[in-house]
Image (cartoon, helix red, strand yellow):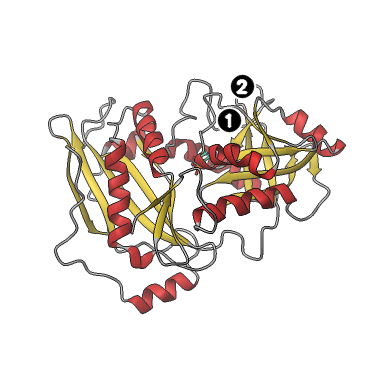
Amino acid sequence: MALQFTPPADPVFTPDDEIAAINADPGFGEHFCDHMAIAHWNPDQGWHDAALVPYGPLPLSAGGAVYHYAQEIFEGLKAYRHADGSIWCFRPEANAARFASSATRMALPPLPVEDFVEGVRALVELDARWVPGGDEQSLYLRPFMIADEEYIGVRATRQATFAVIGTPVGVYFKGGVAPVDIWVCTDAGRVAPGGTGMAKCGGNYAASLLSQEIAHQHGCSQVLFTDAATHTWIEELGGMNFVCITAAGELVTPSLNGDILAGITRDSILKAAPRVGLTPVERPLSLEEVRTGITSGAITEIFACGTAAAIAPIGALLDESGEWRLPSASAGPKTLALREFLLDVQYGRRPDDFGWTQRIC
Ligand SMILES: *Cc1c(COP(=O)(O)O)cnc(C)c1O
């Protein structure tokens, strides 16, 4: 039977003026909305005890499995407020399907798609006042699942908790969509063939953080990872997919090779590419080809994409051996056109003929 995330009888909310003060400049992931959706699993009962409860700590023993063996997965999606005040999600079933496949890879119990979507919907409906209405603002939703069995023997957990929390987020790029410099990692691997690259799990992020620190030391905000075995092929950033636009009018992104996470933004951009006059291409893309392409002009624009920032223009690729910089210091026209297309659909400013958006309330 489908889960019902029952709201509290007497929900307590932050006063509206305090929410307004937070949403005037919410940052990213600093403030959390008043409630969270939660459900529990064990082999006997399956998924059960779904509820909306006040946001707060999850009780977890120091012997809880997730603390020791990182059996954990997560998702990221947003609730957008349209000009008429209604609130919408973007392709939540796609996040739900990916969550279930991440669960399978990490030996966690898959949560049915409809239960995932219902958890998100119920939380957004209850905490609708937290969905900001400003330019490029949204309520970022973070569904996740942890192994919380008190057991440190090594095997798949027999107890898990699913939760959804929400955090208001603002404009990702303060002061316009200025291209960022990216550090190319050619010494460490983030994921490896046969590993967990296709799962959205915390472990992949933990494995990326040292490289990100090194990137910061070189003045770069993000890391581009290459294949762990040969460092020849471009894979993706720590939490965003990688896209190039060519002078020949192609939108090229590395094909899903088992290491690369199947981004929903990536998929949406591949589908939207013809709308801005680009031919979508998924194929292996070598670091050498991209460097040469930047120098020769065969590659005209580069960006990273993911739910958090939508589309983030890239200005240059840097590593120990040099710097490959696109000629323009500002975002390219195709990058901006795709970004506008996507945001216009998400914020209800253009007809959603792909059927991607779903009204919550
Ligand atoms: C979440 C994530 C992305 C982006 O996926 P979206 O569904 O577009 O938000 C890309 N790469 C990695 C490694 C991720 O974890």
Q: Amino acid at mark 2?
A: Ala
Q: What's the CA distance linking mark 2 and mark 1?
A: 8 Å
Q: Residue at x 31, y 76 (%)?
A: 15
Mark 2: few, some, or many residues within 10 Å (few <14, many ≥20)? some
Q: In the displayed orientation, state which residue is furthest to the bottom.
A: 17
- Between 321 and 290, the one nearer to me in the picture: 290
Q: Is residue 270 visible?
A: yes
Q: Toward which corner of the image does residue 2 lie, by quadrant? A: top left
Relative height, residue 19 to residue 76 (above, below): below
Q: Position of residue 143 (x, y in %)?
A: 35, 46
Image coordinates of residue 178 in percent, x first then y, are 70, 57
The quarter of the rendered structure image containing the C terminus is bottom left
Q: Assess mark 1: CB under 8 A from ligand 1?
A: no
Q: Position of residue 307 (x, y in %)?
A: 51, 48
Left or right of residue 340, residue 106 in this image: left
Which residue has dot 1 on it? 189
> Which callout, 2 or 1, points at the residue further toward the start of the chain?
1
Residue flagged by tag 1: what amino acid is it?
Gly
Secondary structure beneath dot 2 equals loop
Element carrying mark 1: loop
Residue 21 is drawn in which quadrant?
Answer: bottom left
Q: Nearer the viewer, residue 246 or 176?
A: 246
Q: Which residue is mark 2?
A: 229
Q: Position of residue 52 (x, y in %)?
A: 22, 55
- Whether residue 57 is visible to the viewer of this picture, yes or no, is no
Q: Which mark is residue 241?
A: none
At 50% from the left and 63% from the top, the residue drawn is 137
Residue drawn 41% across the image and 51% down it: 89
Residue 271 vs 55, above or below: the answer is above
Check contact, mark 2 vs mark 1: CB within 8 A. yes
Question: Is 352 above or below relative to 158?
Answer: below
Pointer 1 local density, CA inside 10 Å: few below 14, some 14–19, many at least 20: some
